[in-house]
Amino acid sequence: MPRPGLFESATPEYVKARAELLSAERRLRDLGEQVAARRRALPRGPELDEDPSLTALDGSPVRLSGLFGDHPTLLVYNMMFDEGWPEPCPLCSMWVDGIDAVAPHLLERTAVAVMAPAGSARLAEVARRRRWRWVPVYSTQPGDLTDRLGLRAHPGDLEPVVTVYDRSDGRIRISWQGSAMLSDPADEPYQPGDGGDARGLDLLCATWSLLDLLPQGRGDWYPSRQAR
């Protein structure tokens, strides 16, 4: 039934279509919870055979194990910004804008970080320009974590990936890792059949979900490098 007020003027066609859409939205919600439950139920993931070396924005050396703090988990966004690139990927920058905004809330439950293979000085410059205040950013130099995670799918290119590390048993393991291409080490990357961009991580970024609420949808919108 339509809500009172403005919805009293809704046409029968709108009321019927909205009810059908609401049913689909509920199924999507339920399926999302089923996927989340299966993710939580994953067995122990692959163990890192060494503690990767990283570099903080001030140039100081750190280890991956030092990023957990008091938490058993570490949530990392692997940004597309390689050594020699003039700028990071605009989509990744938008992603980190959002992560930075919610980092104080996430930090109550898990450690959070952003990583990229670009040097710490370049990362610090980008962080200052985009006013990232809360999320810690690290260069994967001088180690080879980017390559060990398989993020260089093609020469000169990087893949955006979210990695969840777990240290609940005293060892650093990859609990879950997801990419925009929904790739699997044992299979070919998933290619959407609609001709659109890969959307494997879209549900983790509020911008896309909010744009999809609009009648015009997201269209061919692409974040600007000059944003913020």
Image (cartoon, rainbow, N blue to C red):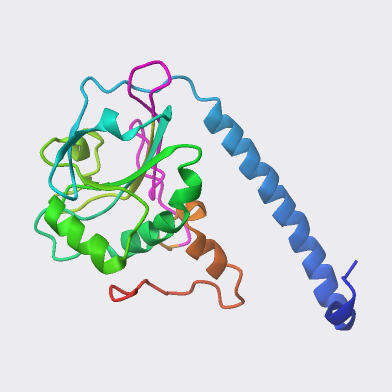
Above or below 217: residue 95: above
Q: Residue furthest top?
A: 169
Q: What percent of the width, then of the height, locates residue 43?
A: 48, 20
Q: Residue furthest bottom?
A: 9
Judged by its main secondary structure, the magenta piece is loop
* Image side of residue 192 versus residue 8, left or right: left
Above or below 61: residue 43: above
Name which residue lies at 48% across and 45% down: 106
Where is the N terminus found, in terms of image quarters?
bottom right
Q: What percent of the width, then of the height, locates residue 225?
A: 28, 73
Name which residue lies at 74% across and 51% down: 26
Is residue 172 something that shows in the picture? yes
The part of the chain drawn in magenta is 166-194
Between 12 and 128, the residue placed more toward the observer is 128
Name which residue lies at 13% across and 61% down: 85
Where is the C terminus found, in terms of image quarters?
bottom left
Q: What percent of the width, then of the height, locates residue 185?
A: 33, 33
Quarter holding residue 68: top left
Name which residue lies at 43% across and 30% down: 71
